[in-house]
Each structure stands twice: as structure tokens, then as C-alpha cells.
Amino acid sequence: MESIPKSGFYYPNKFALIMLEALEDVMGKNGLNAILNLASLGDLIENFPSDNLNKEFDFSDISATNLALEEMYGPRGGRGLALRAGRATFDDALKNFGALAGAGDLAFKVLPLEAKLHIGVPAMAKIFSQMSDQISTVASREHDFIYTIHRCPVCWGRSGEDKPVCFVAAGLLQAGLRWVSGGKEFRVNESKCVAMGHDVCEFIIQKKPLD
């Protein structure tokens, strides 16, 4: 497996801890250990990051974990696991962060769906921009949101891909949308990916729910 160069950009330890625990839930301890070994991250086995918000988990380690999923399970299997891990990461803890914490309050629940999305989608971007070195922005169009990650940890250091690879991020967005909307599912498609040679990773979020 190709090695991913260190980035010098970081996630908080807690975010990485949540992500690794979510992966372990999805694939079991042995499955995760195999992935970590393949990603040259064996030092994380039985030694997850601390439960704090110190920015110490390098983007390259997230990217290497994502690449190892694809290598071990194939593009399709890896994509499914990454989506599930992204969703679990949000559901396990990120919904309690910052502006998203209020999405469970009655005052928020009675808002029209469009208002919930216009508050919730930028709130997700803000959490990552404020708490990590990931920079995210949101633009609203008539039928969709453009969610842009300007410095993406999921595909850091990768190039030459013919398809988008940031399924952990897509899964996270899907779970976040379900949370802020009160249980609805939305289509999230990655339309640009740095690993394909684009300058940003971009996700198109349809405003109309699937159900």
C-alpha cells in the first residue's frame, strides 16, 4: 500500500477516537486491527487517541485508514464500510457538538424542514472548521447545497483516482442531515475530489429528502 505523507494538519483526538471506535463497531476488533496494520498504524492497536480536543491526529492517518479499507475490501466493500463508519461517527458523538447540540430541542424540531437544513448544514461545516484543521464551507442553491471541504483529511496525499473516495465524509453528512431533519434521508453525492485532481472535495446535498 502506498504510504501517505504526513500533512501537518490535525483532527482533535476525540474525533479520531470516535471514528476508530465506529470502525471497530462496524468491522470488529480484528477487522480494525488488520486495517490499522495495513495502514502502517499498528501503534494505534489497543492504543486509541485520548478523549480530548487537542489537535494531534494527523490528516494522513485518516487518509491511510480510508485507503486501507479500499485495499482490503475492494472499492465497493471499502466504500460501504466507510459510509457506515462516517454515519456511526456522527451518531456516536458529533451530534452533541456546538450548534448541532440544539437540534434535538423542541424549538428546533418544530421549524420547517428548509429552515432546519439552512441552520444544520452550515453548523456541521462550522464544527469542523472551528475544531480541526479541516476547512469547510456551504453554499445554498435552489434545489441543493454545495458542501465544500477545502482541506480534506479523508483523501489527503492521494492522487490519480478515477472516482471520488471520501465516503467517510459522505456518511457523516448523511447522518448529520438525518439528525437535523428529524429522521429523513438525503442524497449526498461527492462531485469533486482532490484525489481525482480537483482543488477541493465537493458534495452536492439535495434539499428534497428521499422519503
Image (cartoon, helix red, strand yellow):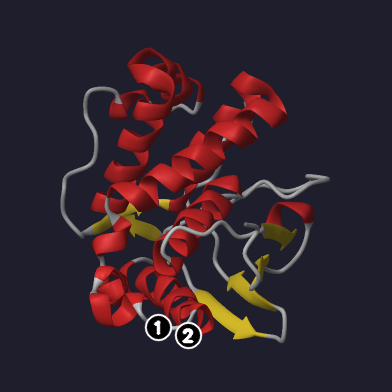
Q: Quadrant of the C terminus?
A: bottom right
**Is any atom of residue 155 visible in this view?**
yes
Q: Position of residue 174 (x, y in %)?
A: 53, 56
Query: Which quarter of the figure is the N terminus placed in?
Result: top right
Question: Which residue is situated farthest in the top direction here?
Answer: 30
Q: Is residue 74 above or below residue 171?
A: above
Name the quadrant containing residue 130: bottom left
Looking at the picture, tell me which residue is in the foreground, 12 or 29.
Answer: 29
Q: Which residue is mark 2?
A: 115
Q: Of residues 115 and 166, which is closer to you in this image?
A: 115
Tags 1 and 2 in contact by the CB under 8 Å rule? yes
Name the outermost residue toward the right. Answer: 162
Number of residues whose C-alpha sits closer than 10 Å to that of mark 1, classed few (under 14), some (14–19) or many (20 or more): few
Q: Amino acid at mark 1?
A: Leu
Q: Position of residue 50 (x, y in %)?
A: 17, 44
Residue shown at 43%/17% (left/top)? 31
Q: Residue at x 83, y 45 (%)?
A: 162
Residue name at image x 23 percent, y 41 percent: 49
For label 1, the residue is: 111
Q: Is residue 209 above or below residue 3?
A: below
In which quadrant of the rendered view does residue 21 lie?
Answer: top left
**Three-letter code, disc 2:** Ala
Observer-side mark, 1 or 2, equals: 1
Q: Is residue 121 left or right of residue 142?
A: left
**Secondary structure beneath disc 1?**
loop
Q: Is residue 191 left or right of residue 54?
A: right
